[in-house]
Amino acid sequence: MDTPLRRAATITRRRAAIPSRAGIGLRTPHIREILATRPNIGWVEVHSENFFCDGGQPLAYLDRIRQDYAVSLHGVGLSLGSLGPLDTEHLTCLKRLVERVEPGLISEHLSWSAVGGRHLNELLPLPYTEEALAVVCRNVHQTQEALGQPILVENISSYLRFTHSPIPEPEFIAEVTARTGCGLLLDVNNVFVSATNHGFDARAYLAAIPAAAVEEVHLAGHDRAGDLLIDTHGARVASPVWRLYQETVARLGPVPTLIEWDNDLPPLAVLVDEMRHADHLLEACHAVAA
């Protein structure tokens, strides 16, 4: 009998060379410097939607980058939590990009951002209910079947919660990975931001995440706006987030880790410095594991 788990099991997991070390988000102002200097970067991640084109300079640069660095694709517009059908044109563009780039990992957010054919420039939180779980799993299955391989889903930062949300978020995430065969992109900064905003224990959240599902970790900076922390991706990783990350890799073992920085973009050297700090913690984890 055909079941979601059986369908997930038929999808081939494509294991490209994303090393268990730190990488950086590839942003346009840094591309020429990277091509010219070939810095010692573990891998790079790009926003999928920036390369939904048939040609031109962006794709040409990405073709050159992937000759020297492993590449991961990270999407922001698929809206896996939307009740309506997925955007088939979006999926077609993503599949075409995947076939061209052959990324080591493909990820999207566990959120919604589209309703009634209208797209919002936000990653909005879900109510953690059985109904929402069924919708997300349906959409993850559709995405994986279209691409022919599993994706990763990422926990988002949030600034409000639904009054009816009976399933704890880590349990909701675990169910998504179990029912669909997808992996988890664990954003440690997002956990810290949400924990601070909503008053829950970040360490307890991380301890409840299924370790075997985690295939990538994100780290980024945040800022404070009154009583809220805002996930801005516009600053260095904060000290308490680094501590959470260190505890996380001690539990998970070495896992590919990305430094995200999208706003107030600094010189490439700053990103590389953050990356090296993550690499140092991963190397320490390797040493302990050995």
Image: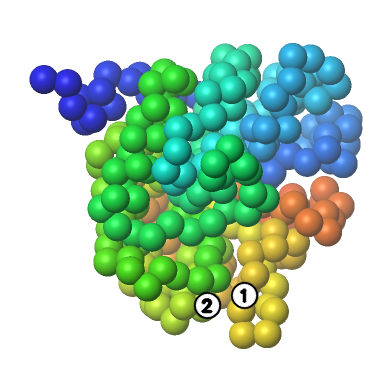
Q: Residue at x 35, y 42 (%)?
A: 135
Q: Which image quadrant: the N terminus? A: top left
Of residues 160 and 18, the one nearer the viewer is 160
Please state the total of marks drawn on the protein image: 2
Location of residue 167 (image quadrant) = bottom left
Query: As drawn, which residue projects farthest toward the left?
Result: 1
Picture disc at residue 157: none
Label 1 close to label 2 by CB (< 8 Å):
yes
Residue 224 is left or right of residue 103, and the answer is right
Query: As drawn, which residue projects farthest toward the front?
Result: 116
Instruction: Name the image colouring.
Output: rainbow
Residue 130 is left or right of residue 271, and the answer is left
Answer above or below: position of 117 versus 219: above
Of residues 105 and 224, the one nearer the viewer is 224
- State whether residue 174 appears in this view: no
Count residues near mark 2 (Cα–Cα under 10 Å), then give few for <14, some for 14-19, many for 20+. Answer: some
User: Which residue, given by chain and number where applicable, does mark 1 sit on?
Assistant: 229
| Sequence-wise first label, 1 or 2 | 2
- Which amino acid lies under the numbered mark 2 shown in the image of this protein? Asn
SS at circle 1: strand
Q: Residue at x 62, y 85 (%)?
A: 227
Picture disc at residue 197: 2
- State whether residue 69 appears in this view: yes
- Cα distance in 3D space between marks 1 and 2: 6 Å
